[in-house]
């Protein structure tokens, strides 16, 4: 274990993005539409009607973007693959040009000494599969495994770190329960079905990876959030316990403990069905790491007017908020990392996303982009990581979200998370002060964050 104020040797420093948020050119070179392409083109679904048609234009600017990563000193780059670029209909025919884009990107990253970390699914299901039921279809785990096999066969020898899904909780909660994300469904009945199929898909992809004998590591990326009660009332305490089970345990319990979470029964009510032993065996195949995406904690208040799955999140008065409205509470990241070890044992962990949206100008001033809140946010969260490591947590790396400002899903371009500023009118990239800090963090293996 390193001394308390240091990060372990070989700690992996990276930055993260996802395909639909940065690539643009969603239909180029024979790609099929994804549910996000479809969703952003519906009226009223995103802020200002923003779409990923251009986004950061990374599909065309990837080469200079890799040089940008290199200038930041990144040791790793986490990105996702657009399923419908590679399989325009979601299954069957492979679009060689789509696959080639990612193959060239991986080669260039390796040439530049940057480790690729690939996420197979960051929310952009092929629209053709949504037409067949999407994640509500019992066939979806099989579709996903077939897609994963195509990608493993193309890149499996070169990519050392794989994630199956990014944040199944958000896919379910925002996509199927609240309808604010693609595919835009709002149904308490659908949410647990989608959750089950996503986990079965995860398990099927892990099985495919193991069966193919690829030599590297594969894991799952979840978003976690400590839940605290808004008051000491029995109702709020019960709501907090529910919110914790729904958010933090729903996906990790089946994968890491091989059991379902009985606390979900009162949350999903009549729509809950316990998992069979056979299903649990399929989702709990051993994985090599868990990726944790972490942004905030949540105070929870019972909402008597709505079903239990809709317990309300409140932000305490006087709290610092990000522009997303989330409470800034970096010290709570330490709790989350400790909680994982306590509940699930010594699984290797990476913080696969952490960052914050703070006010930045749309055009970078000549003197550069000063983002003191984001600078402080990185310092605070990295101190929390360091403290968790000092207490024995097997945390092996940290990826900033995000490499650059991008399309923040239904919030469009209104939320900036980048350590690099993007002027969306000109596509000019400008490293922010937080990017400068991150470069120093990497250079000093974290020593620069101070106490
Ligand atoms: C997602 C990212 C998103 C970020 C900030 C995570 O939920 O993986 O795609 O941009 O949080 O909201």
Image (spheres, rainbow, N blue to C red):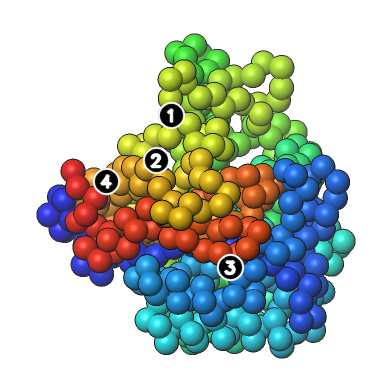
Asked whether disc 1 touches disc 2, contact meaning CB atoms under 8 Å apart, the reply is yes
Residue at mark 3 to residue at mark 1: CA–CA distance: 31 Å
Residue drawn at 78 percent across, 60 percent down = 37
Disc 1: CA contacts within 10 A as few (<14), some (14-19) or many (>=20):
some
Residue at mark 4 to residue at mark 3: CA–CA distance: 28 Å
Residue 80, disc:
3
Name the side, left or right, on which 37 lies relative to 291. right
Residue at mark 4 to residue at mark 2: CA–CA distance: 15 Å
Examine the rendered structure and indicate whether residue 281 appears above or below residue 228.
below
Q: Position of residue 31 (x, y in %)?
A: 77, 76
SS for callout 3: strand
Residue drawn at 75 percent across, 33 percent down = 270
Q: Position of residue 428 (x, y in %)?
A: 56, 64
Residue drawn at 48 percent across, 52 percent down = 365
Residue at mark 3 to residue at mark 2: CA–CA distance: 27 Å
SS for callout 2: helix
Name the side, left or right, on which 50 lies relative to 319. right
Count of marks overlaid on the render: 4
| Residue that protrudes farthest toward the left in the picture | 3
- Mark 4 vs mark 2, foreground winner is 2
Depth order, front residue of 358/240: 358
Q: Where is the C terminus found, in terms of image quarters? A: top left
Q: What residue does disc 1 label?
A: 320
Q: What residue does disc 2 label?
A: 373
SS for callout 4: helix
- Mark 4 vs mark 1, foreground winner is 1
Q: Earlier in the sequence, mark 4 or mark 2?
A: 2
Q: Earlier in the sequence, mark 4 or mark 3?
A: 3
| Residue that protrudes farthest toward the top in the picture | 233
Residue 383, disc:
4
Residue at mark 1 to residue at mark 2: CA–CA distance: 10 Å
Residue 263 sits in which quadrant? Answer: top right
């Amino acid at each position: 274990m390193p001394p308390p104020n240091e990060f372990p040797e070989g700690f992996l420093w990276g930055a993260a993005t996802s395909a639909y948020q940065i690539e643009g050119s969603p239909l180029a070179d024979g790609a099929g539409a994804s549910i996000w392409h479809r969703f952003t083109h519906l009226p009223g679904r995103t802020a200002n009607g923003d779409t990923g048609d251009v986004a950061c234009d990374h599909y065309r600017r990837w080469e200079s973007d890799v040089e940008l990563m290199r200038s930041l000193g990144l040791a790793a780059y986490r990105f996702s693959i657009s399923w419908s670029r590679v399989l325009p209909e979601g299954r069957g025919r492979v679009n060689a040009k789509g696959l080639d884009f990612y193959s060239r990107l991986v080669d260039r990253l390796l040439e530049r000494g940057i480790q690729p970390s690939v996420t197979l699914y960051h929310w952009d299901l092929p629209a053709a599969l949504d037409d067949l039921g999407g994640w509500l279809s019992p066939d979806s785990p099989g579709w996903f495994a077939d897609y994963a096999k195509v990608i493993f066969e193309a890149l499996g020898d070169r990519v050392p770190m794989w994630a199956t899904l990014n944040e199944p909780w958000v896919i379910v909660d925002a996509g199927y329960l609240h309808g604010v994300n693609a595919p835009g469904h709002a149904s308490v009945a659908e949410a647990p079905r989608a959750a089950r199929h996503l986990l079965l898909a995860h398990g099927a992809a892990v099985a495919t990876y193991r069966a193919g004998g690829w030599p590297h590591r594969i894991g799952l990326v979840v978003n976690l959030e400590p839940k605290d009660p808004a008051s000491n009332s029995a109702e709020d305490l019960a709501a907090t316990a529910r919110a914790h089970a729904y958010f933090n345990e729903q996906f990790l319990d089946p994968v890491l403990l091989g059991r379902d979470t009985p606390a979900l029964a009162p949350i999903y009510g009549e729509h809950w069905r316990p998992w069979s032993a056979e299903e649990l065996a399929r989702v709990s195949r051993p994985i090599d790491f868990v990726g944790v995406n972490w942004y905030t904690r949540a105070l929870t208040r019972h909402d008597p007017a709505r079903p239990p799955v809709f317990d309300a999140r409140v932000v305490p008065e006087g709290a610092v908020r990000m522009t997303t409205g989330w409470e800034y509470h970096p010290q709570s990241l330490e709790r989350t990392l400790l909680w994982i070890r306590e509940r699930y044992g010594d699984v290797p962990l990476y913080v696969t996303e952490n960052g914050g949206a703070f006010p930045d100008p749309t055009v970078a001033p000549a003197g550069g982009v000063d983002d003191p809140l984001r600078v402080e946010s990185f310092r605070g969260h990295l101190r929390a990581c360091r403290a968790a490591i000092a207490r024995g947590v097997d945390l092996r790396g940290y990826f900033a979200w995000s490499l650059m400002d991008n399309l923040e899903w239904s919030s469009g371009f209104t939320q900036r998370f980048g350590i690099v500023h993007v002027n969306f009118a000109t596509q000019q990239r400008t490293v922010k002060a937080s990017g400068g800090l991150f470069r120093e963090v990497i250079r000093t293996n974290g020593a620069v964050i101070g106490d």
